[in-house]
Amino acid sequence: MIERLAVRGISKRYGRRQVLRGVDLSVHAGQVAAVVGENGAGKSTFLRICAGLQKPDSGEVIVRGRLGYCPQDAGTYDFLTADEHFMLVGAGREMSRRGARRAGRFAARELRWTAPERAQTRHLSGGTRQKLNLVLAGLGQPEVLLLDEPYTGFDQGAYHDFWRQVWRWRDAGCAIVVVTHLLTHLNAVDTVLDLTGQRVMPGAAA
Amino acid sequence: MRRIGTVADLAIRENLRRRGVLLLLLALPLASYLVRRDAHPGQSIRLLFLGLAWAVSTAALFATGSSRPVEPRLLVSGFRGYHLYLGRLLAMWGLGVAIAGPFFALVAVDHGDVVRLGPIAAAMLLVVAVAAPLGLLIGVLVPRDLEGTLLLLILVAVQMMADPAGSLAKVLPLWSSREIATYAVDHVDGGYLTRGVVHGVVTTVALTALVLCVAAVRLRRRPHLRFV
């Protein structure tokens, strides 16, 4: 299997507080890695560094393929519709408007959500906005997906749908990193990166 | 170009849906114009230009703020900083021209017999051209909306109060509109028009270049991330 994401020796310090110390992680095609840790352990920082949005003090990240990123907060425009978000992110992925809309609506249905044509994002519930957030991350089928606790606001059913979507991506050959503090699905991942103990452990699915 | 066009298209749609904001964006130049309408036309027209600049730059400033949480996702999705800011700038220029249109008609109806309407139109276009990148620049430099708004307020207030013949006024971004207004209303020599147009064009180009440079630096891809 191709190593899609290679994280080598990432360290990050905020003032005097060392958040990440020489963190390594390797995720291959068709694998899911979970990043766990206490509040403030640096989970979101780690993901932002992997996405190239934040600079580490040392270390490197090597990506084979294209990246998709799902931020913790919804990362959407209040006054645009779901379709317009699909068109916007799709333009970045060099998709046609029609293709982006079709792909976005299809992915939304996988999460049991019918993206309304006219409703602006500000009128969507918190959980539905998170579904949009998740769909946008996977638009254009990137080879590496970075998901930062994308299930905030999900009810129990939506939470299970989220994991089913993760497994669909995994089965399609995507390498996925999920930041989580919920341990209920850790038996379904291949690797667990515990940032509190700064160690990598094999997951139950490995 | 398609990425820039999509950003511009969606930024315009987003702004047009904020109906309350649109009304206020029109109310600001209108209030500026009406407050001195009984005085010499030059006073109300100069204040109209400042009100228009204030409205467009504030819209651009807040457009930058509302986009900040979305930018990380867009950068990872394949956009570069200049796609986002150039697209937004085109949208703000479009919005500014749409706001300026009714005010040009108002001046034409109100003072069309005593002012030169061509230069009035040119001044309005230059006001919009300068104000949009000015708002974006403050938005990209100052990360919080309140600080950005206060900074813009200071700039416009200083522009309003500075002696137009003094050197301070000439380095402020909206000096061009005052010069052109003087030419259009007071029927002075063409030097005013030339100075105003040159100042406006140079300021627009400089502010646009600065916005794109700052955006490119702030939204640059970090070198620790390599795609192979």
Image: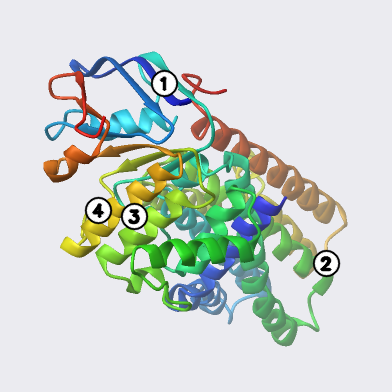
Callout 2, which amino acid?
His
Residue labelled with disc 4: A151
For image coordinates 39% across by 29% down, the residue present is A50
Residue labelled with disc 2: B187
Callout 3, which amino acid?
Ala
Q: Toward the viewer: A121 or B167? A: A121
A19 relative to B61, above or below: above
Q: Residues within 10 Å of mark 1 (few under 14, many from 20)?
A: some
Q: Is residue A102 visible?
A: yes
Q: Secondary structure at mark 4?
A: loop
- Judged left or right of residue A65, residue A173 is left
Camera-near label (1 vs 2) is 1
Residue labelled with disc 3: A74
Residue labelled with disc 1: A6
For image coordinates 48% across by 42% down, the residue present is B140
- Judged left or right of residue B147, residue A3 is right
For image coordinates 80% across by 74% down, the residue present is B117
